[in-house]
Image (spheres, grey):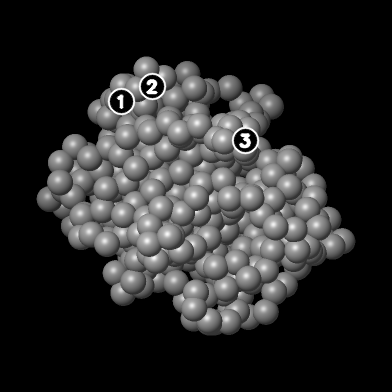
């Protein structure tokens, strides 16, 4: 399906997953209530919104460099008809940070994982990232590295890009103290999966790797270790290998683990979304996990699950799955590398759709009512946006941007 065959040339499908491997509720800005009405378009943080006419040529925006408090006008030429363009005001807080595979945020503190296996932290108020840990330079290249970094209260957990090329390609799992005082190899010889991803909570770290089933076919497994496990501790397999099925997505949200399994020897892959509690999966005889339907990804929020549905061949919609299992289609979204939530909006990082192209658009979709307009906020992201007390992303020139919740609300209000 178009939009799903994004790893052509890389030998596998690349499917989106939440960046840091877990879903968190954003922290509100003090004194920043939701805007009850659109602010004056001439005021700072309230750029004019405009609707894209599909018959018009691309509307070229201003330069991509955003100084403090500037809005960068997106290039609207590739948007669906009816999309509203409302540039998001952002502040450049760091420059020349290189190619970032994964970005995570806690409050206003940012953590980055580069394509050269370096992990850094950018504290609030700092303009230069501080190196926390470094692995050897990787070999080769592949898609789907934007979810190989996760954290809990004290540590970062990350899978290095492979630094050697046996078959299967091996990599390592790091535990790095967020202070940078130590870096531990928790697991070595990890068989790198086509979709490397990590998740963590206060007790366990979870990751996807490749294994071989009893019938000799490779497939994906989910493994786990206690977060304080000593190096060399044997991991536990939570989701066993199913021959010729890759695990293409994994999301940890509270006690629940969600994952998507896809048969990898077909021209029309059909994703299978499952869920179970971590405690059940850790039991000596775990129950059969709950099948939730066909979806490439899942983002839990306020009791609902935000998933993709297929309204017609080669098209996907963002949908809200209610607790009773029914779904409400919200808007056409072909792919999503991360979704964060601000008030009644889902803010989606939409990838360009091809292996090796890390550019993303940032769009917002109303969640309260279906069929609302898609609002494009920016189109020059190189990482999916992440949300703490601020929204943060790296642009395609290597600049780190942040936007306050007030600035996000201003752009959304101006779109109405």
Which structural element holds mark 1?
strand
Mark 1 highlights which residue? 327
Mark 2 highlights which residue? 322
Instruction: Say few, some or many: other residues with alpha carbon within 10 Å of mark 3 (under 14 / 14 to 19 / 20 or more).
Output: few
Q: Nearer the viewer, residue 127 or 183?
A: 183
Q: Which mark is residue 214?
A: none
Quote the CA–CA distance across marks 1 and 3.
31 Å
Which structural element holds mark 3?
loop
Residue 17 seen: no
Quote the CA–CA distance across marks 3 and 2.
28 Å
- Say which residue appears at 29% left-offset and 25% top-offset: 328
Q: Nearer the viewer, residue 289 or 275?
A: 289
Question: Disc 1 or disc 3, which is closer to the eye?
Answer: 3
For the residues labelled 2 and 1, say whether their Cβ atoms are less than 8 Å apart.
yes
Image spot of residue 94 (x, y percent) = 66, 62
Which structural element holds mark 2?
loop
- Say which residue appears at 46% left-offset and 34% top-offset: 289
Label located before the other in sequence (2 or 1): 2
Label located before the other in sequence (3 or 2): 3
Q: Nearer the viewer, residue 74 or 157?
A: 157
């Amino acid at each position: 399906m178009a939009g799903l065959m994004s790893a052509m040339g890389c030998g596998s499908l690349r499917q989106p997953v939440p960046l840091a491997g877990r879903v968190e509720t954003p922290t509100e800005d003090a004194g920043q209530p939701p805007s009850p009405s659109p602010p004056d378009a001439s005021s700072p943080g309230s750029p004019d919104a405009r609707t894209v006419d599909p018959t018009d040529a691309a509307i070229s925006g201003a330069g991509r460099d955003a100084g403090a408090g500037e809005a960068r006008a997106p290039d609207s030429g590739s948007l669906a008809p009816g999309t509203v363009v409302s540039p998001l005001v952002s502040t450049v807080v760091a420059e020349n940070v290189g190619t970032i595979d994964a970005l995570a945020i806690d409050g206003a503190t940012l953590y980055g994982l580069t394509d050269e296996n370096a992990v850094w932290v950018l504290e609030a108020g700092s303009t230069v990232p501080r190196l926390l840990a470094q692995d050897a330079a990787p070999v080769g290249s592949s898609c789907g590295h934007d979810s190989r970094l996760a954290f809990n209260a004290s540590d970062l957990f990350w899978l290095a890009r492979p630094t050697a090329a046996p078959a299967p390609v091996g990599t390592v799992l790091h535990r790095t103290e967020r202070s940078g005082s130590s870096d531990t190899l928790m697991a070595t010889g990890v068989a790198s999966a086509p979709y490397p991803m990590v998740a963590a909570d206060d007790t366990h770290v979870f990751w996807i790797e490749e294994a071989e089933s009893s019938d000799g076919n490779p497939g994906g497994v989910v493994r786990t270790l206690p977060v304080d496990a000593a190096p060399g501790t044997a991991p536990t397999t939570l989701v066993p290998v199913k021959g010729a099925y890759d695990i293409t997505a994994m999301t940890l949200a509270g006690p629940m683990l969600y994952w998507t399994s896809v048969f990898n020897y077909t021209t029309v892959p059909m994703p299978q979304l499952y869920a179970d509690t971590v405690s059940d999966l850790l039991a000596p005889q775990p129950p059969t996990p709950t099948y939730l339907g066909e979806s490439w990804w899942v983002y839990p929020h306020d009791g609902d699950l935000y998933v993709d549905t297929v309204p017609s061949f080669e098209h996907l919609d963002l949908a809200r799955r209610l607790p009773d299992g029914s779904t409400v289609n919200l808007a056409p979204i072909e792919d999503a590398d991360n979704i964060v939530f601000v008030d009644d909006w889902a803010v989606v990082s939409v990838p360009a759709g091809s292996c090796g192209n890390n550019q993303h658009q940032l769009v917002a979709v109303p969640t309260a009512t279906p069929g609302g307009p898609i609002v494009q906020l920016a189109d020059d992201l190189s990482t999916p946006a992440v949300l703490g007390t601020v929204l943060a992303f790296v642009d395609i020139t290597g600049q780190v941007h942040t936007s306050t919740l007030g600035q996000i609300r201003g752009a959304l209000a101006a779109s109405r």
